Image (cartoon, rainbow, N blue to C red):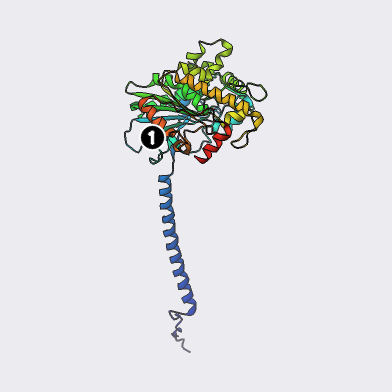
Amino acid sequence: MAFVPVTVSRPQVLPPLFTSRRLYVHIFLLLIIVLILVVVRFMSHVRLTFVHYHMESDTDAELVTLPKSFAREKGAFCLDGSPPAYYYRPSPIISSNLWIIYLPGGGWCVSEEDCFQRSLTSLGSSHVAPTSLSMDGFLSKNCNNNPDFCWWNVLIFHYCDGGSFLGNQSHNVDFKSRSLYMRGGRIFEALIEYLMSTTGLKDAEQIILSGTSAGGIGALIHTDLLRSRLPPSVKTLHVLVDGAMFVDVPDVDGQRSMAKMLSSFYHLHSVKDATSIQECTRTMKKEDTWRCLLPQVYQSFVFTPAFFIQSIYDTWQRTNVLKVPCFAVTCPEAHLDEVYKARDAVQSMAQQIMTSRKNGVFLTVCPAHTILIRPYFYKKEVGNPTIQKSLSSWLQHSEVQTHVDVNLPLEAAVEMCQTA
Ligand SMILES: *[C@@H]1O[C@H](CO)[C@@H](O)[C@H](O)[C@H]1NC(C)=O
């Protein structure tokens, strides 16, 4: 029997092109592709929206942390030992020589425990600082709202020392397994030196040093020192002090809370060793040297033209200095006396500041604490120019005092400001 290989022709197994099952698969794939296209289209639309939003928003000042070696060399540290930092938003105009330096507020730490707690937050560290900032008012880059300053270079110093950028405590304080540094004065100096060597600040023609609340005190006290560090090419230096007309008036229990707060922070942070304040402290009796922190006292030592912005009904001072339990903008009748005493103290401070013709004061009756970098900056108040306008004309002509009716009772003031 011969073995004959046979070729059996294999049956056609290729299926027809379109079975109904195949059809479904194709439609499904087609749908997926359409879906992908739609998603891609949508995402690029979203991205564009974000780009526009980003361009129009003020989230534009970016964080820069000083090199550790530089911080160590200067002995300049945030409370937690991290290096100082600043935010920078360059002018949209290349090689602009207009510069704003801004010191933010944020109160003070007045005890070791207090500073320890703060060292765990962004107010005491550059490690946990936000990487960019959103700015409004005087620092807005929106030229519709902020026509005078929208094209300035902006530097915002990160507030992380808890002592108005003034401390110069030579030893670190060991507290609860942490080393705390109270060296705000060194931070200020280190930042200036670093910026002078790394940015266009050295070519500046006009500089505005500004500060809010605790930062306002720092700006006022450091301004002449800054002047001494600037090259002769700088034509003008002005200082703006916002919401920092702190008054030393008794609280509802007759305690001097402001005095207590300022003197505690003065001693804890060894502010007496800050070069900038010594202009004033050397004229004082030892036990009174902390009083140099009061703008009312320090302002007479300031050579730089200064502009003060203040509400005569400062909401922070009402709560923290007068200890009046105000609700929103209104305060209990029983404590209006204290509120008016503080108002009168602000008013007489304003008069004192204005005895120097280089200075300017903008007072508002609208209850607020800090105004400079709020949208309020452009808001028109009944019978008054906006702060934006007053500031602009002061910078140009150096002669401005706003006349507010300081005798306007609180209730009337509140009403007026709500309808403004
Ligand atoms: C801090 O104190 C030291 C020593 O007294 C002094 O040399 C230095 O200039 C001071 N720094 C500041 C920022 O005041």
Say which of 173 and 183 sits in front.
Answer: 183
Residue 183: image location, x then y, percent: 52, 23
Residue 90: image quadrant is: top left
**Can the viewer see residue 73 in this picture?**
no
Residue at left offset 48%, top offset 73%: 25
Residue 420: image location, x then y, percent: 49, 39
Q: Amino acid at mark 1?
A: Phe
Residue placed under numbered mark 1 in the picture: 149
Residue at left offset 32%, top offset 23%: 233
> In the current view of this chain or complex, which residue is farthest to the right?
253
199 w.r.t. 224: above or below: below
**Can the viewer see residue 291 in this picture?**
yes
Helix, strand or loop at mark 1? loop
Residue 9: image location, x then y, percent: 44, 85
Neighbourhood count class around disc 1 (C-alpha, 10 Å): few under 14, some 14–19, many 20 upward: many
Residue 236: image location, x then y, percent: 36, 24
Say which of 57 and 347 sits in front.
Answer: 347
- Figure label count: 1
Q: Is mark 1 within 8 Å of ligand 1?
A: no
